[in-house]
Amino acid sequence: MNVLELLLEPNLRGVDLQGFERIALHADTLMRKQLIRGVFKEFYDTSMALDRNYFRDVTGHRIELGAGTSFFKQCYSSVISTDVQPAPHLDRVIDAQEMDLEDQSVRTLFCINCFHHFTAPQRFFSEVLRVVKPGGGCVIIDPYFGLLAEVLYKRLFRSESYDPEAPNWSYCVDPVTNEVLPNQALSYVVFFRDRTKFTTMFPDLEMVYTTILPNYLRYLLSGGLNFRQVIPSFLAPLLRKVELASSQLTRVLGLHHVLVLRRR
């Protein structure tokens, strides 16, 4: 047994981390581990602040895609929580690449740690243009592509890959196992490496905001949803202060970034 297997949450050993079984187990982790719960609450607060800032004059639904174990709706009751798989805490089942939603019925789509699971982002963008009202848009939080992220994501998550050189906007083949896995570098590939391609294909989707989130110490030391927490949760405020004080290092140490797309 290697170090990562020793650090894995005991209830996740032998579980397919892409399978349906993980949802209930991850939900239990979020209830038990206040440190990672605080990081997720910050995801939701950031998403809603960006919604208010960029889409405030637009009416329509606020929909969370790929919710999984999310407690977004517990924090903001107006959000409709959905996933491609059913679960008791979700409002609806929606496939982000083929949304069962009326044309121009949506103000905001929230994609928190799910964009890199889309097998055909082009279909998702086409659906955004169909269901979102002009002036509305999409808030995406996904793995960042800094130095620490590149080192960690390649090693921590065997159920997902990390390939910034992937030729396609889709899943990629793991070079070691030959498995077809989600590419955690997908948001980098689409919005940064292939920015010209994206803007050419989808000129009516304007990237109006992007930044790196300063949560790296809390996220890493919490163990996330899959690994054991290595420090007590009461240190969260201190860790937050250290993250803010070392903001100049966020470009190197950041683990997540946020992007806002607005429909022209």
Image (spheres, helix red, strand yellow):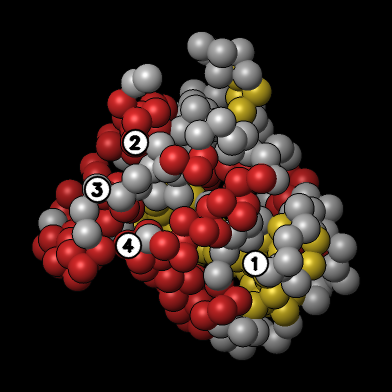
Q: Which mark is residue 35?
A: 4
Helix or strand or loop: what does disc 3 sit on? Answer: loop
Q: Are marks 4 and 2 in contact (CB under 8 Å)?
A: no
Q: Position of residue 21 (x, y in %)?
A: 66, 45
Mark 2 vs mark 3, CA separation in Å? 9 Å
Q: Position of residue 77 (x, y in %)?
A: 61, 84
Q: Is residue 172 left or right of residue 193?
A: right
Q: Amino acid at mark 1?
A: Glu
Mark 1 vs mark 4, CA separation in Å? 22 Å
Mark 3 vs mark 4, CA separation in Å? 10 Å
Q: Which mark is residue 230?
A: 3
Q: Which mark is residue 64?
A: 1
* Residue at x-position 34% and y-position 31%: 6
Can residue 213 be seen by looking at this rendering? yes
Helix or strand or loop: what does disc 4 sit on? Answer: helix
237 or 256: nearer the viewer:
237
* Residue at x-position 53% and y-position 53%: 26
Residue annotated with mark 2: 7
Mark toward the viewer: 2 or 1 = 2
Mark toward the viewer: 4 or 2 = 2
| Comes first in the chain, label 2 or label 3 | 2
Q: Is residue 91 left or right of residue 55?
A: right
| Comes first in the chain, label 1 or label 4 | 4
Q: Amino acid at mark 4?
A: Leu
Q: Amino acid at mark 2?
A: Leu
